[in-house]
Image: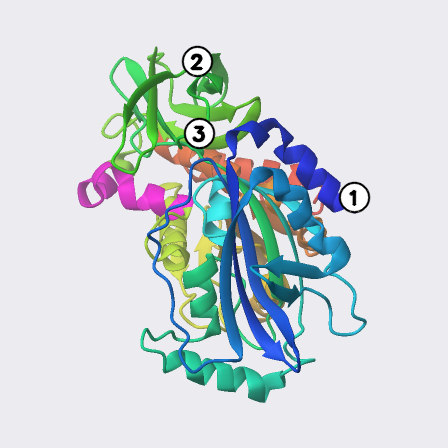
Amino acid sequence: MHEQVQKFLEAVKPFREDYVAAELRTVAYRWKSDWINLATRAVLVTRKPDSRRPSIALKDMPDLLLTEAVLPVGDLRHVVEVFETGNLEVKGESINCRRANPPTPYSPFYRSYTRRWAREQLGLDTHCHALSGGENTIQATIGNDGFDRLESKVAALRTPFTGLGDLVRAYTGGTAMAGSWSYSTFEVIAPVWVRLAQDCRLGSRGITLKAFMREGHEPDLASVGVVQSDATAILHRKRIRLVTGRKTRDGDILITAETPLDRRTNRVTLLLSYRSELVDRSELFRNRVGKWNPKVSIVDSVDRDLRKLKEGLAGKAREPGGAFEQAMVTLLTLLGFSCLHVGRDERNPDIVAWALDPAVVFVVECTIAEPDLRNKTTKFAARLRHTQAVAPTSRVFGILATTLAKSVINPADLERLKADKIILIDGGRLNELEAIADLGAGAGEALEKLQSFASSEGISEVKISE
């Protein structure tokens, strides 16, 4: 058995007894006498799948196949064996899951997804374990012309779709299919449907904790780690068991708890665990408006409870990319920077900012996806060189800001950022800068924090304040 398959099965093992079945859906296209996999997704479920999901009629489309099956969870090993055999049997149909040349099975890759990363990459709003593989077989089989013909027919269906990618998303939930150069994918996903609710909050004296759990998981096995801190130090650490409450309209189980809030606390970190594994995390901030940074009071008057700012920095806005850029402009302004938002042109960086010294300029690139997406890291390095060339008397520093945690960023990207002397501000570091802004510490402390970020990445050449 492939090492990556073993990793997946080992990761899923603690949750196996929660799952009752695997819901499998496949989209395939015909090439010669074979059905070639276009997208297959098998999702482990903790309750019986909803039989009322709408079907998609493929009238007059003999070259496209949509098929599904609900498999006992004990058949999971047979599903992952596709990565050894290259063949999937569904309701009497044989689906080819191999490379085109040489005709070998897809290479599997295991990955654990945080809730935010799973929402962006898998379309599932919860912590997931996933085993996936794929290959660009479209070019080697039906080619661009065949792909375009399928796209045209899909758009002409009684229930129209904008393309094959749209059809795949609607039928399987998969998000990877985009064009004829896309990979045919095979995914096996084990979602852990235990997650924090959005309305966890800080009261005047206590912390209210809420989480949702899908039926089939065990409420007694969930707990929340609560870490209270001020701007500089940890004040309290505590783990709390959650109490089972009512069922929601969707059939999920609400679990809740409360714990005292230290009056010195500025930030609370919530760490939700299930079966001894971290499945979700969140940050809560005490509302210091009017007592600390006066700039925050002004922003709060037009952005009640700083909701847009917080959603933007967390990548949870309706249009996350643009909202994240605007939230970064606001955050840097609260920190005492003068900012220009110039990222509307593809040739420009997202933000240019100055702090205490007008001869020191910060060029900021924002991303809600991995930095290597669309070659962003290389483009950013080129923009930095251009800025230095047009302002030869200035000292130019590059900052890559992302909503992602550093742990999910490709190591090769981290090395490239280090080589190009670009300072990384990930989701955790954004929280640190938010705390500084909330206290009104000013640009001086923010610059010291940026210097510490650079030092921790081993970029000793970066000297922000000399």
Question: Main SS of the magenta segment?
Answer: helix
Specify which label sits upstream in the sequence, 3 or 1: 1
What residue did someone put label 2 on? 240
What residue did someone put label 1 on? 3
Question: Can you give x and y, in whole percent of width and height, for residue 459 in the image?
Answer: 70, 45
Left or right: residue 269 compared with residue 86: left
Left or right: residue 278 compared with residue 330: right
Does 237 appear above or below 30? above
Q: Residues within 10 Å of mark 2 (few under 14, many from 20)?
A: some
Q: Residues within 10 Å of mark 3 (few under 14, many from 20)?
A: some
Residue at image location 75% in from the left, 61% down from the top: 105
Q: Is residue 462 visible?
A: no
What residue did someone put label 3 on? 216
Mark 2 vs mark 3: in front: 3
Q: Quadrant of residue 138?
A: bottom right
Q: Is residue 112 magenta?
A: no
Question: Can you give x and y, in whole percent of width and height, for residue 261 in the image?
Answer: 34, 13
Left or right: residue 183 compared with residue 107: left
Indicate the amino acid at tag 1.
Glu
Residue at image location 29% in from the left, 38% down from the top: 250
Does 150 appear above or below 280? below
* Snapshot colouring: rainbow
Q: Is residue 308 magenta?
A: yes
Magenta region, residue range: 298-314
Number of marks in the rendered image: 3
Specify which label sits upstream in the sequence, 2 or 3: 3
Provide the secondary structure element on which disc 1 rests. helix
Residue at image location 37% in from the left, 63% down from the top: 55
Q: Quadrant of the C terminus?
A: top right
Residue at image location 46% in from the left, 46% down from the top: 356
